[in-house]
Image (tube, rainbow, N blue to C red):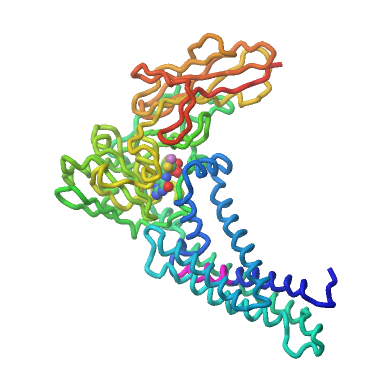
């Protein structure tokens, strides 16, 4: 602790602290500048986006499995920790050689700026938050380092290397306050582009094509069994957006172009005027594990997509509908699937409300029967008719299959895995899905015995999941429960386990319970 004789360890410590403080100042200033440039151009967000895009597939899968929907805060937190560690090192070295400190800040600033300008859909001034942050951070570092060693403060050589605690403390507190104020102001200003007001102002029209009533028997209403309709707040969220894109209805435009006879541009009011349909459709993510949570059923209100494409006049050979979101995500859907009569739509409503921002406000695509990464573009602003040979969308570039119908799947919701239940009649229940083909049969087996038929709940169409229940006469002991579904084409989901990559998981969901 007390090395006052030479002062070197203390100076190193003070230098390290200076590095961290300077980094905080840089981050705060960058956040503030980003509020005037583009929220996505803030360095940590930009680097995070680049990390997501560059992460090799297996690792991305691990991240999703480990952190679920909190993978984003974990990523942001890790980037900040790495930045602070590097700054700490830079500061410790810079206390002896200030040019090292400046070089370090320059490199970190350059990394942020490079990430920001190379993000898809980046604005022209995307480099500015990182550059201004780095310049102010460098200045802060120099001031802090100077206060570590006040010239003329000590007379002897040994004293001259000691830390002037008071001046360093004052400067540090000043830097911390400046960083906090800039960062806080930046956050407040960044939130000013929140679409809450635009969303609240939306009046959804009555559907020209209303949904079929959900049959009363669709929801068995058992404890722990997923509700037939997933509330918006509980609906799973999967996307690469570190900052939820904020698109107001006023600014929203959709451009339909590419291999079409006639380009179309639509604004939000024109979209609402197109005669909307309302449908219950179950979305599923291809990265959902067996028994996983990335599936949900909602009532979507939207403009029929096929009508719009017919109006544009799609060329015969345009086999891919390439949609783009405002944040540069690309998703490719087979044109033939969109046009085959199913209820593909540009959705504006979800369970009677305007789309929540996280689920694509103001407009997203919904195509029954296809995994989200090939159909469900949120914050969609562009539809380009093209071919599968000419263009590889985001996930296809990363090895996922270009055409991905949802695989038949079933899940046990209750009893929960490792639950303790009372002997006697136990309701084993869950959901099964085979969108656009329909679930025809769900069977369970206990301890590897004979497959038993379950009772299926009713459904409004083949595009939703289907609840099922089996009254099990449970005897004391540990038991395994397995489930498998058969679609309306008579195909039973295979028992062979496969990972989600590259076309969706297969295998039977199995749980173990204790009966007493
Ligand atoms: N703009 C954009 N749209 C997107 C994605 C994305 O990362 N960005 N992810 C897709 C994936 S992989 C899925 S599974 C669905 C999830 O939709 P949800 O978050 O509303 O459940 O959105 C799709 N649409
Ligand atoms: Mo997905």
- Figure quadrant of the C terminus: top right
Q: Where is residue 167 in the image (x, y as percent from the top left)?
A: 74, 82
Tell me where residue 245 sits by quadrant.
bottom left
Q: Residue at x 21, y 43 (%)?
A: 309
Magenta residues span 26-36
Query: Left or right: 311 with respect to 493?
Result: left
Query: Left or right: 46 with respect to 26?
Result: left
> Ligand 1: which quarter?
top left
Q: Which residue is drawn at 51% across and 29% down?
A: 290
Q: Which residue is drawn at 14% across and 48% down?
A: 261
Q: Position of residue 92 (x, y in %)?
A: 68, 71
Give the camera-side residue of 82 and 281.
82
- Regarding residue 12, the answer to whether it shows in the image is yes
- Figure quadrant of the N terminus: bottom right
- Regarding residue 353, the answer to whether it shows in the image is no
Tell me where residue 456 sits by quadrant.
top left
Per the picture, the main secondary structure of the magenta-coloured stretch is helix
Q: Where is residue 511 in the image (x, y as percent from the top left)?
A: 59, 23
Give the camera-side residue of 300 and 430.
430
Q: Residue at x 56, y 19 (%)?
A: 428
Please, which residue is most extreme toward the left here?
A: 261
Query: Left or right: 72 with respect to 207?
Result: right
Is 456 placed above or below 371 here?
above
């Amino acid at each position: 602790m007390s090395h006052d004789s030479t002062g070197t360890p203390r100076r190193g410590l003070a230098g390290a602290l200076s590095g961290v403080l300077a980094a905080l100042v840089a981050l705060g200033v960058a956040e503030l500048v980003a509020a005037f440039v583009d929220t996505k151009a803030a360095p940590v967000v930009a680097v995070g986006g680049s990390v997501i895009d560059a992460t090799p597939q297996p690792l991305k899968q691990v991240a999703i499995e480990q952190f679920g929907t909190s993978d984003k805060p974990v990523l942001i937190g890790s980037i900040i920790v790495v930045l602070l560690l590097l700054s700490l090192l830079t500061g410790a070295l810079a206390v002896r050689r200030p040019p090292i400190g400046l070089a370090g800040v320059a490199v970190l600033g350059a990394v942020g700026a490079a990430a920001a300008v190379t993000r898809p859909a980046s604005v022209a001034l995307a480099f500015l938050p990182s550059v201004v942050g780095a310049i102010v951070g460098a200045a802060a570092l120099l001031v802090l380092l100077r206060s570590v060693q006040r010239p003329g403060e000590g007379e002897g050589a040994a004293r001259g290397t000691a830390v002037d605690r008071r001046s360093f403390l004052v400067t540090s507190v000043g830097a911390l306050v400046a960083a906090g104020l800039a960062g806080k102001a930046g956050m407040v200003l960044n939130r000013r582009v929140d679409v809450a007001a635009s969303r609240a102002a939306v009046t959804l029209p009555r559907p020209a094509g209303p949904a079929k009533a959900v049959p009363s028997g669709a929801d068995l209403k058992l404890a722990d069994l997923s509700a037939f309709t997933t509330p918006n707040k509980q609906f799973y969220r999967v996307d690469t957006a570190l900052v939820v894109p904020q698109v107001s209805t006023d600014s929203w435009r959709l451009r339909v172009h590419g291999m079409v006879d006639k380009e179309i541009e639509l604004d939000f009011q024109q979209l609402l005027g197109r005669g909307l349909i309302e449908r219950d459709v179950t979305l599923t993510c291809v990265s959902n594990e067996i028994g996983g949570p990335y599936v949900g059923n909602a009532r979507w209100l939207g403009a029929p997509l096929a009508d719009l494409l017919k109006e544009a006049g799609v060329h015969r050979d345009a086999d891919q509908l390439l949609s783009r979101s405002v944040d540069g995500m690309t998703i490719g859907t087979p044109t033939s699937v969109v046009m085959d009569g199913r209820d593909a739509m540009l959705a504006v409503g979800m369970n009677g409300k305007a789309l929540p921002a996280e689920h694509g406000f103001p407009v997203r695509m919904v195509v029954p029967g296809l995994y989200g990464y090939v159909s469900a573009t949120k914050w969609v602003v562009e539809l380009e008719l093209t071919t599968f040979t000419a263009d590889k969308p985001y996930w296809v570039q990363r090895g996922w299959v270009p055409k991905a119908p949802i695989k038949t799947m079933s899940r046990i919701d209750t009893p929960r895995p490792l639950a303790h239940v009372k002997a006697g009649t136990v309701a084993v229940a869950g959901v099964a899905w085979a969108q656009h083909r329909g679930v025809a049969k769900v069977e369970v087996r206990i301890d590897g015995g004979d497959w038993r038929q379950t009772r299926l709940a009713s459904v409004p169409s083949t595009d939703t999941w289907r609840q099922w229940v089996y009254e099990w006469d449970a005897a004391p002991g540990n038991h395994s429960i397995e489930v498998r579904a058969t679609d309306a084409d008579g195909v039973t989901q295979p028992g062979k386990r496969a990972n989600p990559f590259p076309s969706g998981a297969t295998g039977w969901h199995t749980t173990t319970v204790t009966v007493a």
